[in-house]
Amino acid sequence: MEFLEATLARAKSLQKRLVMTGGTEIETLEAAKVVMTERLASSVTLLGKESEINKVATREGVDISDMSIVNPELCPDLSKYTNEYFELRKMRGMTMEQAKIDIVKPLNWGAMMVRLGAADAVVAGVNDDSVDVFFAGLAIIGTAPNIRTASSCTIVVGKDLSMGVDGAFIFSDCSIVTNPLPDQLSDIAQCAAQSCRDLLRVEPVVALLSHSTKGLKREHKDIEKIRIALDMIKYREPSLIVDGELQVNAALVPSITDARVPDTPVRGKVNTLIFPDMDAGNIAYQTARVFGKAEVFGPFLQGFAKPISYISRGSELSSAVITCAATLARVH
């Protein structure tokens, strides 16, 4: 599959440094081993107590001799990382004592490694709650320039290779922002466009989806949200090829596009689909997977200044490796 091959190849070519927070999780250890064996990263750092990580690795038969282990509580950088974390959070009531407690949590430590350049990307483990991962990304790594709302995207690869990028589309946001306001929807669209560049390796063509196409039920508040978001996107990124509001068939089927929006710049080229809320996005990709037998990858976090993601609970080894590769592939 083109998406998989391209993502693995890009990670391999970049040779970046990965830190993984779930050092005592078998899912993390197995994924890390594949990452190193396939040379998807130049190095992998596991976070946690060395004795505990080695115990799990030995019990599960995973050779981690080619990886580094860092125990935040014993690391020489502890004072440096604590001070940086305190400076980031003191205006929100963080005390130095609390900073000392919080920074040694593997998730915060991994995010700080990326912030300070000791690693290029961080992937959290299955025992890290997705909300905590998101908070660590916001609090420590921060969002990309001119982006206030971080979000997520999902890669959906359908059977029709003439659509999208060899059948692949960016769906966003399907798992983070529940009911975005217009400015948040604008951020989601811009971040998804960058995800298209990073993960599908093509220039994005973006459709803001709706239950109507260009003017039907103009008074509806959900339509107005999309219209405002579209104006914001065009102002912020005038070179981006984007249109909305569009029904799915008007966005993807050229004959219907010609009938309803003949002047749209996205005709026959859409590869990035933006949903009006999380419910719509989640239902869409699940429906594509169940009824359309599409391959689904992700979710992948987007909109952060540097790459951060997490291994979903219950993921198979192949999915965990793809998450690592996709996160590494986003390093600029």
Image: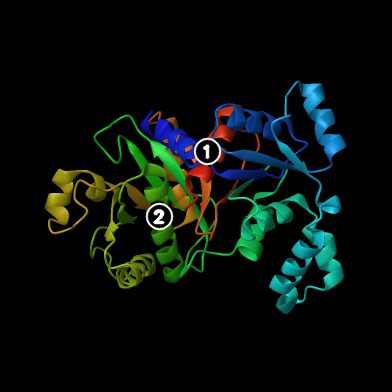
Residue at image location 52% in from the left, 47% down from the top: 300
What's the distance in space between the residues labelled 2 and 1, CA to CA?
Answer: 17 Å
Q: In this view, does 192 lie above or below 253?
A: below
- Place of residue 25 in the rendered image (x, y in percent of width and height, measured from the top left): 74, 35
- The one nearer the camera, 181 or 55, is 55
Mark 1: amino acid: Ala
Whether residue 121 appears in this view of the structure is: yes
The secondary structure type at the circle numbered 2 is helix
Q: Residue 309 has which mark?
A: none
Residue at image location 73% in from the left, 39% down from the top: 68
- Place of residue 291 in the rendered image (x, y in percent of width and height, measured from the top left): 40, 31
- Place of residue 143 in the rendered image (x, y in percent of width and height, measured from the top left): 54, 64
- Place of residue 169 in the rendered image (x, y in percent of width and height, measured from the top left): 36, 43
Quadrant in the picture for residue 99 = bottom right
- Residue on which disc 1 sits: 325
Q: Within 10 Å of the Cα at label 2, are there few (<14), some (14-19), or many (20+) other Cα atoms?
A: some
Q: Which of marks 2 and 1 is nearer the N terminus?
A: 2
Q: Within 10 Å of the Cα at label 1, are there few (<14), some (14-19), or many (20+) other Cα atoms?
A: many
- The one nearer the camera, 306 or 242, is 306
Residue at image location 44% in from the left, 64% down from the top: 187
Q: In this view, does 274 lie above or below 294?
A: below
Residue at image location 78% in from the left, 58% down from the top: 77
Task: Quarter of the image for the N terminus: give it.
Answer: top left
- Residue on which disc 2 sits: 194
The image's colouring method is rainbow
